[in-house]
Amino acid sequence: MRYKMIVSYDGAYFHGFQRQKGYNSVQETLEQIFSHILKTEVVVKSAGRTDAGVHAYGQVIHFDSEQLIPPSNFKKISNKLLFPHIYIKDVKCVNTEFHSRVSAISKEYHYLVDIGEFCPLKSNYRHYFHNRIDIDKIKEAMSYIEGTHDFKSFSKNHVIKNTVRTIESFKLDVDGTLLTFKIVGTGFMYNMVRIIVALMLKVGEGKFEPTYIKKVLDGKDRALAPYVAPANGLYLYKVNYDKDYDI
């Protein structure tokens, strides 16, 4: 039996999603709880590995087990044991063709920036940015990111050979002092979203003109965009699939 789950979690309490020896991770926590419930060892696979401090509204995971528990019961039992920093939003039984990462056709990330007064109670959940900022210039710069480009300048990973990615949409919502960057793409490299947002903020504060983004893309050089926005403002919002895998 293959279980598919949509999971939300508070990344401030974990050293990333992936299991790491000596650190508290989302993956290890889920595996311990599910193994306890199912009375057998469980190995969890995810749609993406979020870094330390990064949050999720809609992370997708899957795992296999010979034990069958009705999805609604599994959700209820799991959430009692995972409370309060992880929450299972949905549980389904799917066919073995489904893979949380391989089957995904796109992912949506949100990045929260607050340009208002600092609040320590929210500091783990948004990036406070108090420099002068030009929203119109940011939106102009964002237009260069959309489409299919070589994003070599926007990745800290020097091992990946194919750095071409497609960004389907890149939007900015402004609600008072809260700026929410919403980016949807077919794939993202390590730190890619945080590097993009950091560069947008540099444009917003006047360090670069919006047209500089094209220079960064064409240059294919990480030195042209050596900035990384903090992890605490980033959320894996949604993972999209092109069909249902329910059984």
Image (cartoon, grey):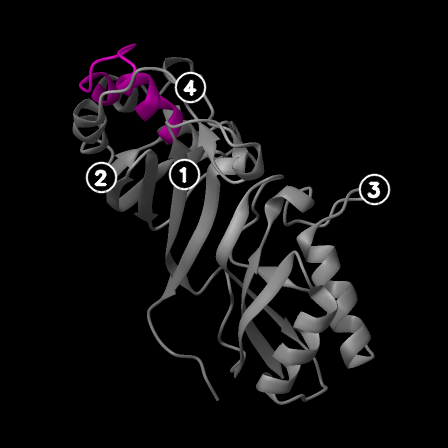
Quick one: label 4 or label 3, which is nearer the N terminus? Answer: 3
Query: Magenta residues, as a range?
Result: 197-214
- Estimate the x, y position of residue 52 in percent, counting from the top left: 63, 39
Quick one: label 3 or label 1, which is nearer the N terminus? Answer: 3
Q: Which residue is mark 4?
A: 222
Q: Which residue is mark 1?
A: 112
Residue at image point 32% right, 45% down = 182
- Estimate the x, y position of residue 13 in percent, counting from the top left: 68, 45
Q: Amino acid at mark 1?
A: Leu
| Secondary structure type for disc 1 | strand
Principal secondary structure, stretch drawn in magenta: helix
Is 212 covered by the magenta stretch? Answer: yes
- Estimate the x, y position of residue 150 in percent, counting from the top left: 31, 32
| Secondary structure type for disc 2 | loop
Asked if one can make out residue 214 in the rendered structure from this viewpoint, the answer is: yes
Residue at image point 52% right, 40% down = 125
Asked if one can make out residue 162 in the rendered structure from this viewpoint, the answer is: no
Badge 1 crowding class, 10 Å Cα cut-off, few under 14, some 14 to 19, many 20 or more, is many
Badge 2 crowding class, 10 Å Cα cut-off, few under 14, some 14 to 19, many 20 or more, is some
Q: Which residue is mark 3?
A: 22
Tally the marks.
4
